[in-house]
Image: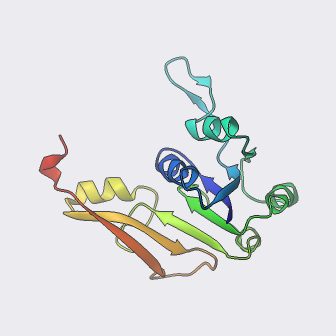
Amino acid sequence: MKVAYLGSPPFGATVFEALLACPRHQVVGLVTKPDRPRGRGMKVEPSPMVLAAQARGIPVLQPERARGEEFLTVLAAWQPDVLLVASYGEILRQDVLDLAPLGAWNVHASLLPRWRGASPIQAAVLAGDAETGVCAEDGSRPRRGAARAHGAHAHWRAGNLG
C-alpha cells in the first residue's frame, strides 16, 4: 500500500520509524513542518524524520501550511492509497483528506476522547492516569464529539517512571 505520511517529531517520528520498518507499505512521501533552529547554537538542522526519509530516497515536503494548489499538486503526484497522520500540528482541510482513495488515518497519543489536543501524553501524566495508549482514528471526515477509534492500550504506573 502506498502511504503518504504527515507528522512532526517527537511523537510523529516514532510512528514514522514504525511505518518505515513495515515491509507491506511503501512510503511515497513525507510531509512535515519546516526545519527549525535547534540545539545550543540554534542552527537550522533537519529533523531525524527528514534525514531518515532522505536516506531512503523518500520525497520530503515541508510547507509552512498544508494548503494551496502547489501543496495539493505535489501530494497528489505521489498517488498515495492512504494518508497517515501523526502529530502533524495542523487540522487538515477536506481537499487534502480527499486525496487518497482509502482516506486518512490519524494516530493519536491518547485513548480518545479523554485527552484530545496538543499534549495528550503530558495530560495523562499530570492527571495520574494508570492507563494510557495510542488510538488510530478515521480522519477522512472531520467530526465533533467521539471519534471512530481503534486503541492499543499501554499500562504504566507513575511510580515506575524513574
> What is the x, y in percent for residue 154?
28, 62
Q: Is residue 111 above or below residue 69?
A: below
Q: Along the line of sight, which residue is nearer the eye, 56 or 9?
A: 56
Q: Quadrant of residue 76?
A: bottom right
Q: Residue at x 33, y 64 (%)?
A: 133
Q: Is residue 37 above or below residue 21?
A: above
Q: Along the line of sight, which residue is nearer the eye, 128 or 54?
A: 54
Name the outermost residue toward the front: 23
Q: Along the line of sight, which residue is nearer the eye, 154 or 11?
A: 154
Residue 112 visible to the viewer: no
Name the outermost residue toward the top: 41
Residue 93 visible to the viewer: yes
Q: Residue at x 29, y 63 (%)?
A: 132
Q: Is residue 156 above or below residue 14?
A: below
Q: Is residue 162 left or right of residue 118?
A: left
Q: Quadrant of the N terminus?
A: bottom right
Q: Is residue 60 left or right of residue 45?
A: right
